[in-house]
């Protein structure tokens, strides 16, 4: 994984001066395990290591709380959100409902422009997979799905999918270090692209649901074994 060294962060925040930069960095640290579930986020520590203002850090916390990545607990401050097995199941039930609905709404055969755009993203995703670059892989994967579901013709539905997908980022990334899973994810993406050239929305929806279920099951298997502190 490639992270910006902490000693270089200060100049970035002084230059950008944006709360988004703080939120993006903290989100990455949660997604890739630098910040663990239930770990406390201390304002003063984040200000010191980033050079950001208190206002920027608090605004970043607001955004992350809205996206479900952190929680504010009475008398305990701000902590990285943790999930029970039931909460994981509930989140994925909602994701499946939303993503199946979006897949069923995409007009098939899809326009050549959409297919070409997804193929270009998938080539980048595949290259990142081969290189084991999980940061670039994660970002390309997000672009793939946002582009796919953006074609459903309902921007509110697409935004809901993005929001709930964000809440499962830390769940999904647990398997990205697994070479065999990365290869399977690439194969599934290409099958989704192939399905866009046909006229069977039900088959497309089934492929999409199969694709999102495996990371959930892997995460829950860790939970059941007591390996994962969700």
Image (spheres, rainbow, N blue to C red):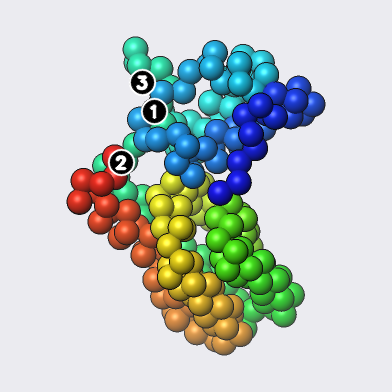
Q: Which of 196/190 is in front?
A: 190
Identify the mark nearer the N-term, 2 or 3: 3
Alpha-carbon neighbours of circle 3 within 10 Å: few (<14), some, or many (≥20)?
Answer: few
On the rendered image, what quadrant is the C terminus found in? top left
Q: Residue 9's x, y, as percent?
A: 68, 28
Q: Relative to residue 11, is residue 161 drawn left or right?
A: left
Q: Which residue is mark 2?
A: 230
Residue visible at 55% across and 86% down?
199
Q: CA distance from mark 1 to mark 2?
A: 11 Å
Q: Which of 27/204 is in front?
A: 27
Picture disc at residue 73? 3
Q: Residue 132's x, y, as percent?
A: 55, 61
Observer-side mark, 1 or 3, equals 1
Identify the mark nearer the N-term, 1 or 3: 1
Residue visible at 55% across and 55% down?
134
Residue 213 lies, with reference to residue 107, above or below; the image says above
Q: CA distance from mark 2 to mark 3?
A: 17 Å
Res 164 seen here: no
Res 51 seen here: yes
Picture disc at residue 39? 1
Residue visible at 34% across and 12% down?
75
Q: Relative to residue 225, is residue 169 drawn left or right?
A: right
Q: Relative to residue 127, is residue 27 drawn left or right?
A: left
Q: Relative to residue 92, is residue 30 drawn left or right?
A: right
Identify the mark nearer the N-term, 1 or 2: 1
Query: Mark 3: which secondary structure?
Result: strand
- Cβ atoms at labels 1 and 3 below 8 Å apart: no
Q: Which of 105/171 is in front?
A: 171
């Amino acid at each position: 994984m490639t992270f910006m060294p902490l000693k270089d962060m200060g100049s970035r925040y002084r230059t950008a001066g944006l709360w988004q930069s703080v939120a993006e960095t903290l989100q990455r640290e949660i997604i890739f395990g630098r910040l663990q579930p239930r770990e406390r986020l201390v304002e003063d520590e984040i200000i010191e290591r980033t050079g950001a203002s208190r206002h920027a850090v608090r605004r970043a916390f607001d955004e992350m709380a809205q996206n479900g990545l952190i929680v504010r607990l009475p008398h305990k401050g701000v902590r990285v959100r943790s999930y029970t097995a039931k909460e994981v199941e509930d989140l994925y039930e909602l994701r499946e409902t939303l993503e199946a609905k979006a897949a069923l709404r995409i007009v098939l055969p899809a326009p050549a422009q959409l297919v070409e755009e997804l193929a270009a993203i998938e080539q980048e995703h595949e290259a990142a997979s081969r290189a084991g670059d999980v940061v670039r892989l994660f970002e390309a994967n997000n672009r793939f799905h946002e582009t796919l579901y953006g074609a459903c013709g309902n921007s509110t539905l697409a935004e809901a999918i993005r929001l709930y997908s964000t809440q499962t980022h830390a769940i999904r990334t647990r398997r990205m270090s697994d070479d065999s899973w990365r290869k399977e994810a690439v194969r599934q993406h290409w099958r989704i692209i192939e399905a866009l050239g046909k006229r069977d929305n039900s088959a497309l929806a089934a492929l999409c649901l199969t694709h999102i279920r495996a990371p959930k099951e892997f995460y829950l298997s860790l939970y059941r074994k007591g390996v994962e502190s969700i």
